[in-house]
Image: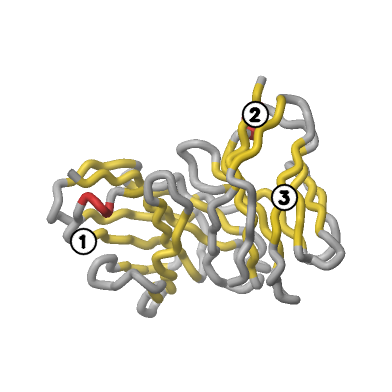
Amino acid sequence: DAKTTQPNSMESNEEEPVHLPCNHSTISGTDYIHWYRQLPSQGPEYVIHGLTSNVNNRMASLAIAEDRKSSTLILHRATLRDAAVYYCILSGGGADGLTFGKGTHLIIQP
Amino acid sequence: SAVISQKPSRDICQRGTSLTIQCQVDSQVTMMFWYRQQPGQSLTLIATANQGSEATYESGFVIDKFPISRPNLTFSTLTVSNMSPEDSSIYLCSVNREVGNTEAFFGQGTRLTVV
């Protein structure tokens, strides 16, 4: 699986937007970009995924670079409940397990 | 979405013993996945469990240490055998959305402490 690189941690203030970057320079043409987050003492939960175009859902937006070598997860208005470890994962879209990197620990300040 | 229940949620076990973790899904799924999350670390895939066939193990994980059963399309067990303190981790069960495999769902995990 292609590797992703994320900052170890980021800090933001409540009610402000958060941009979480992810580099994946070795992404293949068939790799989807997935984002999961893990709240304290819980299993990971799906956030969003995309292939080439930017994507929006009720949780977040995903901005994908034109060359697909990087992407950014955007939380439009962070709340304290968004404090979690965010994982950027590449997946071929098949029926395989996921390869988790170290993720970004997002800290939200009140 | 899929609802996944894991039992037990946590346990403290003596070294040398074995623990079987159960994973129940509220819908039929083709494949179930088992992950390990060591303290302060990310998740690592242990194996993929298909109903009616042997589980497929990732590099570094072997069947003798982590035997898996998959008796039907909604249930699986993972056994951690002959435990040592190094096996202290959170063990998580996961399934993929059946249509399109676009997202994975995870159980809450089993927090295992070996003393």
Number of labels in the image equals: 3
Asked which secondary structure carries label 2, the reply is strand
**Viewer-proximal residue, B78 or A34?**
A34
Q: CA distance from mark 1 to mark 2?
A: 40 Å
State the residue at coordinates (65%, 29%): A108
State the residue at coordinates (62%, 37%): A106
Considering the image in quadrants, where does the N terminus of chain A appear? bottom right
**Viewer-proximal residue, B98 or A16?**
A16
User: Which residue corresponds to mark 1?
Assistant: B81
The amino acid on which the numbered mark 3 sits, given as a three-letter code, is Pro
User: Which residue corresponds to mark 3?
Assistant: A21
User: Which residue corresponds to mark 2?
Assistant: A108
**Quadrant hosting residue B93:** bottom left
In the displayed structure image, the side of residue B84 where residue A70 appears, left or right:
right
Q: CA distance from mark 1 to mark 3?
A: 40 Å
Residues flagged by tags 2 and 3 on a common chain: yes
The amino acid on which the numbered mark 2 sits, given as a three-letter code, is Ile
Q: CA distance from mark 2 to mark 3?
A: 16 Å
Asked which secondary structure carries label 1, the reply is loop
